Amino acid sequence: MFHIDFSTEGEIVCSGRLDAAQCAIAQAFMDSVAETCIVDFSNLEYISSAGLGVLLKTQKRLAESGAQLKIINVNNHIHDVFRFSGFHAIFEIEAKQR
């Protein structure tokens, strides 16, 4: 199961598993983002390469206007996925606070 929405603070909150089956939902939501935004992964359990693609497409679109995504509360597993894929160089990423 995957869920994405804005928090009361205006951050994007993702929970569950962002895999290929959920990418259309995630992409439709991210297409509505037009400015720099924080994406909270505190409840995201898993991200696939397809999920990374959604983030990359959004980051590239936002960069055209000088905006970006900042990803916070990333667990160790997802942080490894970003590091091994080289995406840690594309996004500002903040590890989950312990």
Image (cartoon, rainbow, N blue to C red):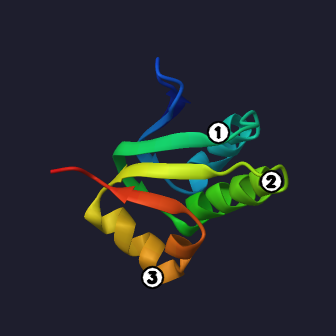
Residue sitting at x 15%, y 51%:
98
Q: Quadrant of residue 53?
A: bottom right
Quick check: 82 above or below 11?
below
What crowding class fits label 2: few (fewer than 14 Cα within 10 Å), some (14-19), or many (20 or more)? Answer: some
Secondary structure type for disc 1: helix
Amino acid of disc 1: Ile
Position of 47 compared to 96: left or right?
right
Count of all numbered marks drawn on residues in the image: 3
Q: Residue 21 appears at what percent x and percent y? A: 58, 51
Q: Residue 5 appears at what percent x and percent y? A: 54, 28
Q: Which residue is mark 2?
A: 61
C-alpha distance separating marks 3 and 1: 25 Å
C-alpha distance separating marks 2 and 3: 23 Å
Which is more toward the observer, 11 or 75?
A: 11
Badge nearest the viewer, 2 or 1? 2
Badge nearest the viewer, 3 or 1? 3
Amino acid of disc 2: Arg
Residue sitting at x 76%, y 37%:
34
Quadrant location of the N terminus?
Answer: top left
Q: Which mark is residue 15?
A: none
C-alpha distance separating marks 2 and 1: 18 Å
Residue lying furthest top in this view? 8
Q: Which residue is mark 3?
A: 84
